[in-house]
Image (tube, helix red, strand yellow):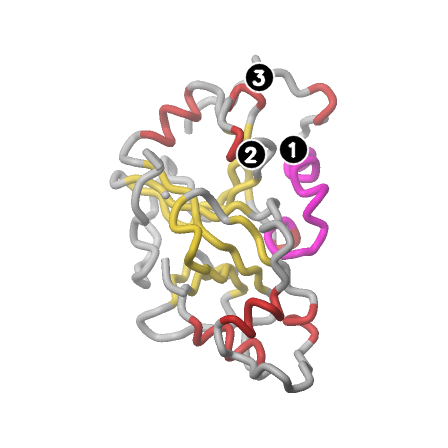
Amino acid sequence: MAPAGKRSGVHRAARDEPRRDCASYLDGRLLIAMPVMGDPRFERSVIYLCAHSADGAMGIIVNHPAGSIVFSELLLQLGIIEKGRPIKLPEIAESMKVLRGGPVDTGRGFVLHSSDFFIENATLRIDASVSLTATVDILRAIVEGNGPRRAILALGYAGWAPGQLETEIQGNGWLHCDADQDLIFDNGIEDKYARALHKIGIDPAMLSSEAGHAWP
């Protein structure tokens, strides 16, 4: 593991840098796709923004399952647990979902997790409660029961070139709202989209492709 097409390359996701005090940037917030988005890869998606700056943006989709991939089978493929031996995993690992984090670098894994876990030179602290780590060391820690309290594993990520996300928001492609740990980490994947909309007072049944959300 390690670290969106024109969704561009990752920005600052591999470094532990302090967040900027700038209201124009949305890192640490959730993006919610609008019907007008028009890109099937992001239909009804909820994205946690890990980084956003003048250089672009990078985020992880938190509500799209990665098909039939099972976390324990992925651990076997990575050699983290041995084949042929009984698999006994901590509760967090047993329930951990594998998500489709975005269309870029889909062969790489990213663990979005609570900030009670940190690996020097590998973990990006996004805010006081959420961090991102993209090395296999965090998976080993989870298997050994020494990992973060809450986590999701995503394959791939979404990213934007400089100014691209701002343009998409101005074009009514995205809404955005405050993030919370349940929306990011819990296993109720199917209703995260509706729950995110409800968080900003929108009934999904009434959502129109004409609705907008002013930048920033």
> Looking at the picture, which amino acid does disc 1 mark?
Leu
Residue position for label 1: 197
Q: Is residue 89 above or below residue 191?
A: below
Residue at the spot x=45%, y=60% of the render?
109
> Looking at the picture, which amino acid does disc 3 mark?
Ala
Residue position for label 2: 32
- Check whether the beta carbons of the residues at disc 1 and disc 2 lie within 8 A of each other: yes
Q: Residues within 10 Å of mark 1 (few under 14, many from 20)?
A: some
First in sequence: mark 2 vs mark 3: 2
Residue at the spot x=26%, y=38% of the render?
54
Extent of the magenta region? 183-199
Q: Is residue 127 above or below residue 136?
A: above
User: Image check: 190 left or right of 44?
Assistant: right
Q: Which SS class for mark 2? A: strand
> Looking at the picture, which amino acid does disc 2 mark?
Ile
Q: Residues within 10 Å of mark 3 (few under 14, many from 20)?
A: some
First in sequence: mark 1 vs mark 3: 1
Frontmost residue, 160 versus 114: 160
First in sequence: mark 1 vs mark 2: 2
Residue position for label 3: 211
**Residue 150, quarter of the rendered image:** bottom right
